[in-house]
Amino acid sequence: MRRTPPHLPFLTGPPDFTVGLRPIDPQDWLLPDWEADCLPEKRALIAQQREAVFRCTQGAQPLCTEAADSVGAHLHIAAGGDLVAAAVAVSDDLVVMAPAPDGGYRAVAAVLCAPTYFSAQEAIGKDLFGLHAPVPDRLADGAPGLGRRIGRVFSGLQPNQVLERFNWTLQPGPARYTPSSGPLMAIADTADAADALALLHLRVERQTIRKLPQTGAVLFTIRISLDPLSAVFAVDGAKAALVSAWANAPAYVRSYKRWPRMERLMRAAVATAF
Ligand code: HEM
């Protein structure tokens, strides 16, 4: 049965590259898991492609142990200090960010089974500037704005406080494991426009950050929700809001999110929806 999408972030307007983090009740961190249906697929992916989806750098084990056990405690399971055991118990991907001597944070371990066009291999070792280098920077002073602003949030984070934010885009098809946009864009180029309403999916990333009290690491979690536009448009007001957000997003955001490649399908989906 088709569900009502859990998040409709475009209802508040077009996307932009902002920090947009807000504190939430730590009890609402990872539960309920409204994407738990993907867990068998996630477990199979880890079993089949462990090297591609899991990385832990030398020396990061104490941070991974604390991260795994904090997830375990929240889910009421025994993760035994094992990041993968924690990651297969919840739909969210887990990235462990270690405090660095320069005051920044660096990705030292990750289980990434639903990445939006990046991989554990690419992320590991990078700091917040390196991770966000591909994101167009729009601060007037030309300084590396996004990485710097996120760094400030990381430094000011209080132990066990949980902050939440959302990113979203559209994609053709329901694929969760998307380390590269290439295969999706090939679908976008060739798909039959008559299928657009069922094919195009809203992809929402719910991200959280939490500082771990013992090691000072920051655990970054990413939960992906995927819903076809047919389900999105069934919500009152959602079609008009999405059309408006799609059209009014700044050109650099549209281009970064590869929206021009999906314009043909988006138009067809809107035209065929009731
Ligand atoms: C919690 C604070 C963070 C904020 C506010 C933030 C913000 C953003 C924004 C605005 C984008 C552009 C994507 C879009 O809007 O669709 C982005 C992309 C990205 N972020 Fe973050 N981010 C944060 C933390 C992290 C962390 C901890 C990682 C570590 C893995 C990370 C990895 C990435 C990657 C890999 C991309 C895609 C870059 C690319 O296109 O290759 N982010 N982030």
Image (tube, rainbow, N blue to C red):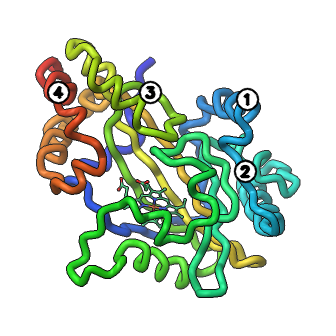
| Amino acid type, callout 4 | Arg
Give the left or right position of residue 178, taking residue 87 as reference.
Answer: left
Q: Secondary structure at mark 3?
A: loop
Q: Looking at the rendering, in which quadrant would you find the C terminus? A: top left
**Residue 103 image point, x, y percent:** 59, 86
Q: How many marks?
A: 4
Q: Residue at x 18, y 33 (%)?
A: 263
Q: Looking at the rendering, in which quadrant would you find the N terminus? A: top left
Q: Give 215 or 144, whichever is nearer the viewer.
A: 144
- Residues marked 2 and 3 touching at CB (< 8 Å): no
Q: Earlier in the sequence, mark 2 or mark 3?
A: 2
Q: Which residue is mark 4?
A: 264
Q: Secondary structure at mark 4?
A: helix
Q: Residue at x 54, y 51 (%)?
A: 222
Q: Secondary structure at mark 2?
A: helix
Give the left or right position of residue 114, taking residue 239 as reference.
Answer: right
Q: Earlier in the sequence, mark 3 or mark 1?
A: 1
- Residues marked 1 and 4 touching at CB (< 8 Å): no
**Residue 95 image point, x, y percent:** 63, 58
Q: Give 21 or 151, whichever is nearer the viewer.
A: 151
- Residues marked 3 and 4 touching at CB (< 8 Å): no
* Label 2 near ligand 1 (CB < 8 Å): no
Marks 2/1: CA–CA distance: 25 Å
Q: Is residue 242 visible?
A: yes
Q: Quadrant of residue 188?
A: top left
Q: Which residue is mark 3?
A: 174
Q: Which residue is mark 2?
A: 75
Label 2 or label 3, whichever lies nearer to me, is 3
Q: Quadrant of residue 98?
A: bottom right
